[in-house]
Amino acid sequence: MATSVTGLLLIGCAAESGKAARSAGAANEKKEAEVTPGEDLMQEHGLIERILLIYDEGARRITQNEPLDLETIAGAARIVRRFVEDYHEKQEEQFVFPRLQRAGREEALVAILLRQHQRGRELTEEIVRRASSSASPELAQSLRSFSRMYRPHAAREDTVLFPAFRAVVGADGYQELGERFEENEHTIFGEHGFENTVAQVAQLESALGIDDLAQFTAR
């Protein structure tokens, strides 16, 4: 009987050990699945690129004298103001740029990026104002100017700025900032703020008929 009890205890210990291992494995998987600050910002750049496609289509329609619902353009600009300028860029200006400047890294690039942030906000004001009146050549120019500036802006951040930032803050600091970014996003936009914003952009794409990815396939 003693042997049987011992066997049961060993089986129980083995089961608890297996459960603990599975729990630890799940925790590690969750940790690995967490979005890092660089990935977070890059995902937001993907959202911005989709808005730039809306701007491109708006400018094209104005130039070709094709029908254009200006509220679609104004709606895209409001997303730029709310999500890109008041949130995404503020995250960079508060957490990313200062750390690079203090470390003496990419200072010239940071200075240019800051100027472009300011110029982008000016262009957004122009777009919102002009979209409230008519589909003018000036509106088309503002849309093109914003797109022309922001594509290389985001690309330089993705390929130069963010890698330098990660090297400066180190692994622990990088993880801590990732948690801070997520908290800020949830505080400002709610639990699914990014996903909801993507859905809003998708609605604007659908309104313009540019929501089908297949139509962009090269011929």
Image (cartoon, rainbow, N blue to C red):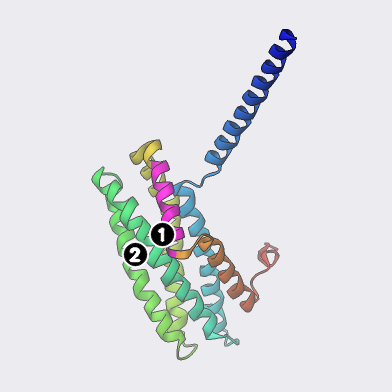
Q: Which residue is mark 1?
A: 153
Residue 28: x and y in percent read: 55, 35
Q: For marks 1 and 2, give the CA distance.
A: 8 Å
Find out whether residue 196 is within the magenta segment. no
Name the image quarter holding residue 208: bottom right
- Image coordinates of residue 137 in percent, x first then y, are 46, 85
Answer few, some or many: residues within 10 Å of disc 2's Cα (few below 14, many 20 plus, some between 14 and 19): some
Q: Residue at x 43, y 65 (%)?
A: 84
Q: Secondary structure at mark 2?
A: helix
* Image quarter (top left, top right, bottom left or bottom right) of the N terminus: top right
Residue plotted at (42% across, 81% down)? 128
Q: Is residue 214 above or below residue 101?
A: below
Q: Overall secondary structure of the magenta stretch? A: helix
Which corner quadrant of the image does residue 111 belong to? Answer: bottom left
**Nearer the observer, 181 or 206:** 181
Find numbered disc 1 in the image and state the secondary structure of the residue it sits on. helix
Q: Looking at this rendering, what residue extends furthest in the bottom direction?
A: 133
The residue singled out by tag 2 in the image is 116
Judge by depth and name the residue closer to the eye, 155 or 75. 75
Stretch of the chain drawn in magenta: 174-188
**Residue 109 shows in this picture:** no
Q: Position of residue 125 (x, y in %)?
A: 37, 78
Give the mark nearest the N terminus, 1 or 2. 2
